[in-house]
Image: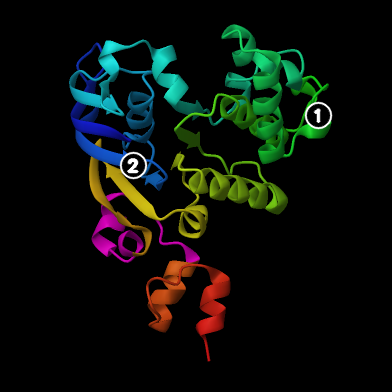
Amino acid sequence: MSIVLDDVTFAYPDGSLAVDGVSLRIDAGERVAIVGQNGAGKTTTVKLMNGLLKPTSGTVSIDGVDTKTQTTATTARSVAYVFQNPDDQVFAPDVRGELEYMPRYDKWDADKTAERVQRAVRMTGIGRFLDTNPSDLPFAIKKFVAIGAVLVGEPRYVILDEPTAGLDSRGLALLNRMIDQLGAEGVAVITITHDMRFVADSFHRVVAMANRRVVADGAVEDVFADDAVLHASRLQRPVAAQLVRDLGLSRTALQIDTIAALIP
């Protein structure tokens, strides 16, 4: 079970390239952060993964199925995309309706609907807001409503676009618990983010992009230790990785509490 991009290019109608020769494989249960500055090709790459865009050349396959052979809606059932701004995704008059939209559309029975909705509510912590209009909720809560709505469908891959934006420490802790649970269940979690601390704390693999290409793909500690990659993708080394470098500690220790325990 995997998402595979094989020498994928995407060009706009005017011929300008958004991604150029990207090859990438993401397996079930992986936690992958795609990083790079604006214009590097990150958003286009993940939209190719869930069928919002079709490649101009090359192939994108989900669990062995070419995305060009199926509709975007079909692909999105396997590869869910949570947008950066929940207002682009949330539309129902109350949170319960948002969570139940897919079950109603697909005509699920009541028991299946209740089970899936309750699971999504537990994972996102939005139970007390079920009867609230999403437009009346704080931005951070709306983000979890949008996440909950896609989790109801139990996708095999979840893409989170800048998920930490607007979250306080409690929201970030909830997000990390959710990512842990999804990983334990074999669901791949893919994020595009500028939050390098989030990447260092929560992800195992980093794909760095620059100029519409992949410039590095490897373990988080290796990518953040590579000056050439950071320069090419115009990324700032997270504080934890800089501390590890300055103190000469093991590169595998990228969490602040782990680093503190290693200091004599």
Q: Which residue is mark 2?
A: 27
Callout 2 touching callout 1 (CB < 8 Å): no
153 to 91, vertically: above or below: below
Coordinates of residue 226 in the picture (x, y in percent): 28, 63
Which quadrant does the N terminus fall into?
A: top left
Using residue 252 as the reference point, say whether residue 68 is left or right of it. Answer: left
- 167 and 93: which one is in front? 93
Whether residue 169 is visible, yes or no, is yes
The mark closer to the camera, 2 or 1, is 2
Coordinates of residue 141 in the picture (x, y in percent): 72, 34
The three-letter amino acid code for the residue at tag 2 is Asp
The three-letter amino acid code for the residue at tag 1 is Phe
141 to 99, vertically: above or below: below
Coordinates of residue 48 in the picture (x, y in percent): 33, 25
Coordinates of residue 211 in the picture (x, y in percent): 24, 39
Distance from Cα at disc 2 to Cα at disc 1 = 34 Å
- 207 and 76: which one is in front? 76
Magenta stretch, residue numbers:
222-239
Q: Which residue is mark 1?
A: 129
- In reply to whether residue 230 is colored magenta, the answer given is yes
